[in-house]
Image (cartoon, rainbow, N blue to C red):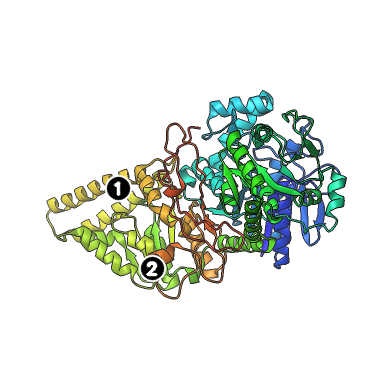
């Protein structure tokens, strides 16, 4: 495949995200894929270069070139809004190289989304922090985890962090462009379950509520142990005796205050070593501490070999701190906090220890336990090293390759054996069903016809459910219609659910009126021999039906927040089936789908799901929902673990027990299961106030 990776930065500008993008690019190349990287132009770097076989394209942007925008002249950040020059450059690059999929990291996603407008290339947005919903990117306000975006609080907090000149624009663009970006995203990739839950609640709302979230962990960037470890330690100024090691930004939200307090309370404890980067808000440290700044990554990895254990006492919901698994890769247990993605990385009492955030006494107790019980520390370290071995570049590269393949090839003749088409009146469901039936040689069943034919039955609901069950048991079919009260069996059995969600309600109403007028005229012509009163009754019946359906059409409209009652009910019904929903948000969807199926190539259809491979025999409902198949790792959707999201405006926060969990095999992703949706946060129940 040909993959385009888009990121704010790329090495030689080194940071956690940049190294992950580079590791992914190299893993894909090693698999035989062609990889291009698009990034923002930086000082003294060529516009076109290469990293081995990886082609790097650096684009000069309008905002990054303006004076006063970048606080660091050698590290120009993309702002949280589309840059027209970058978007145009991405568009030209896409037309030139024609990638199968594009994956974007960071705020350059806004330019990527604009550059891919009306393109058939699926956009996968990777989320490694909270920048798409939080102007300060850390989801932390006044030392507490923020409950979610809100204009007043975000504006005030961002202004305090950045100053009003940068804080106000950042807030207005991040909050104002959330829904725009979400609607243009095919799949969201989250690095941890907490990040996925947060994006589901605060980013993928309204019309984007059914966009799938896949969780794939980061690569463990662990150099092999250095045979000259002692020399490295001496050169780095590390203590000669075993020590407790913290690695990370030297900032308050990393939990430095409770860490220093906990260590001081231990008395005669091993020395505490801090390795990281100093920031404007870095606190003053006691003189007896060993503080090392700007240490090369290889020396950081060597430093773990001399540590008793590591500490990651983050207060903020750290999405997936790489230092935790780096320590684990060297056989060192880590004491972490129960926030963010740390709970995806450490299994309490098995591969490390977990404590509450900002709880110095609990942190001190955990540290004392590992100091006084070296056997426990060794056991946890061994288990951690075994656990982290799953997150190799090869495994992560395979996971992403499967994601690209499924996302780019969501529609194919082989996968469309049982198709259910949904949407409001007048969107073209029946037309698409008939044409798909002809193209794929599938029997077609119109649910509206079934509803009319069974209207006179003694128990219409039972009769309709029995007919739907009989259809679902067949190996091949196309059905169209909503009728949620008796069609769940069809949703369960379908290989693909095509949601036509593009036609605005005035156009849908015009189509329905035209259809009813044609029907009334045809019926009147057939009744020429009847009395005039008979024709009048026919007109009255058609008019009554038209009025009823007009109300239904308005209820399916997706304008505004998408709060139409019928559409909300349909969105909720789709939640358990997100992995096979193909959502069409363009009026040309019918022709595109047919052309895609006929040619068996990806088309510009915005898929909200990852279609599972069609089995040889009709699957059970559970098998239909689970896209995993033996011999190939599954893509985990909305993985959740013990982390929770704070309630917003009094709303109940989703917990891990609210998820439908199923096991996912090892091979580069969390062992926890995949959840289809959060309980209490249905597709059109928007929780954030912004």
Closest to the observer, 505 or 383: 383
In the depicted structure, whether residue 581 falls above or below residue 149: below
- The reply to whether the C-beta atoms of the residues labelled 2 and 1 are less than 8 Å apart is no
Is residue 108 visible to the viewer in this orientation of the structure? no
Of the numbered discs 2 and 1, the one sitting upstream in the chain is 1
How many numbered markers are drawn?
Answer: 2
Q: Which mark is residue 549?
A: 1
Is residue 689 visible to the viewer in this orientation of the structure? yes
The reply, left or right, for residue 320 in relation to residue 194 is: right
Residue 390 locus on image (x, y percent): 63, 61
Which SS class for mark 2? loop
Picture quadrant where residue 560 is located? top left
Closest to the observer, 30 or 345: 345
The reply, left or right, for residue 629 in relation to residue 85 is: left
Residue 526 locus on image (x, y percent): 20, 61
- Nearest to viewer (mark 2 / mark 1): 2
Closest to the observer, 357 or 267: 267
Check disc 1: other Cα within 10 Å, few if <14, some if 14-19, many if 20+. Answer: some
Residue placed under numbered mark 2 in the picture = 620
The reply, left or right, for residue 262 in relation to residue 624 is: right
The reply, left or right, for residue 510 in relation to residue 105 is: left
């Amino acid at each position: 495949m040909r993959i385009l990776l888009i990121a704010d930065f790329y090495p030689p500008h080194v940071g956690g995200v940049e190294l992950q993008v580079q590791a992914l690019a190299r893993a894909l190349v090693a698999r035989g894929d062609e990889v291009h990287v698009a990034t923002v132009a930086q000082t003294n770097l060529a516009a076109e270069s290469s990293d081995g076989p990886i082609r790097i394209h650096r684009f000069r942007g309008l905002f990054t070139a303006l004076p006063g925008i970048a606080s660091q002249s050698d590290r120009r950040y993309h702002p949280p809004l589309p840059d027209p020059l970058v978007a145009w450059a991405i568009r030209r690059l896409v037309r030139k190289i024609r990638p199968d999929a594009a994956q974007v990291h960071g705020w350059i996603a806004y330019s990527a989304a604009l550059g891919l407008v009306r393109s058939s290339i699926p956009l996968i947005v990777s989320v490694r922090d909270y920048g798409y919903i939080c102007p300060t990117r850390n989801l932390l306000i006044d030392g507490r985890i923020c409950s979610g975006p809100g204009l007043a609080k975000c504006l005030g907090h961002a202004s305090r962090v950045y100053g009003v000149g940068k804080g106000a624009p950042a807030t207005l663009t991040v909050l104002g462009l959330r829904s725009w970006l979400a609607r243009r995203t095919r799949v969201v990739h989250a690095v941890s379950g907490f990040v996925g839950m947060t994006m589901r609640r605060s980013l993928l709302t309204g019309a984007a509520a059914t966009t799938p979230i896949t969780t794939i962990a980061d690569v463990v960037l662990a150099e092999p142990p250095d045979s000259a470890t002692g020399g490295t330690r001496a050169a780095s100024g590390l203590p000669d005796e075993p020590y407790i090691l913290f690695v990370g930004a030297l900032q308050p939200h990393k939990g430095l205050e409770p860490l220093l307090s906990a260590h001081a309370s231990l008395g005669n404890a091993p020395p505490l070593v801090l390795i990281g980067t100093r920031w404007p808000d870095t606190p003053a440290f006691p003189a007896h501490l060993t503080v090392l700044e700007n240490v090369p990554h290889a020396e950081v990895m060597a430093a773990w070999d001399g540590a008793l254990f590591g500490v990651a006492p983050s207060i903020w919901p750290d999405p997936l701190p790489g230092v935790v698994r780096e320590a684990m890769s060297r056989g060192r247990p880590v004491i972490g906090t129960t926030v963010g993605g740390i709970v995806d990385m450490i299994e309490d009492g098995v591969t490390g220890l977990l404590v509450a955030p900002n709880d110095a006494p609990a942190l001190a107790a955990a540290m004392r336990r590992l100091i006084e019980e070296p056997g426990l520390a060794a056991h946890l370290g061994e288990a951690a090293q075994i656990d982290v071995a799953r997150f190799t570049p090869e495994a992560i590269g395979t996971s992403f390759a499967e994601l690209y393949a499924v996302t780019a090839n969501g529609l194919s003749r082989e996968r469309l054996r049982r198709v259910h088409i949904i949407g409001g009146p007048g969107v073209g469901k029946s037309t698409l069903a008939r044409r798909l039936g002809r193209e794929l040689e599938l029997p077609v069943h119109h649910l509206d016809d079934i509803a009319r034919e069974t209207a006179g039955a003694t128990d219409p609901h039972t009769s309709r459910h029995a007919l739907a069950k009989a259809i679902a048991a067949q190996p091949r079919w196309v059905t169209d219609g909503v009728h949620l009260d008796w069609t769940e069996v069809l949703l369960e059995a379908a290989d693909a659910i095509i949601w036509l969600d593009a036609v605005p309600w005035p156009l849908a109403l015009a189509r329905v009126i035209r259809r009813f007028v044609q029907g009334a005229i045809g019926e009147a012509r057939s009744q020429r021999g009847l009395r005039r009163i008979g024709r009048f009754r026919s007109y009255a019946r058609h008019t009554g039906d038209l009025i009823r359906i007009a109300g239904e059409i308005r209820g399916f409209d997706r304008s505004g927040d998408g709060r139409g009652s019928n559409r909300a009910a349909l969105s909720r019904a789709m939640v358990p089936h997100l992995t096979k929903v193909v959502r069409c948000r363009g009026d040309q969807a019918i022709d595109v789908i047919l052309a895609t199926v006929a040619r068996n190539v990806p088309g510009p259809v915005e898929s909200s799901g990852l279609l599972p491979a069609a089995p040889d025999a009709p699957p059970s409902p559970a098998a239909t929902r689970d896209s995993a198949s033996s011999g190939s790792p599954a893509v985990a959707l909305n993985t959740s673990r013990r982390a929770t999201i704070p309630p917003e405006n009094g709303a109940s926060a989703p917990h891990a027990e609210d998820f439908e969990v199923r096991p996912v095999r090892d091979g580069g992703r969390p062992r926890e299961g995949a959840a289809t949706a959060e309980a209490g946060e249905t597709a059109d129940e928007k929780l954030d106030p912004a």
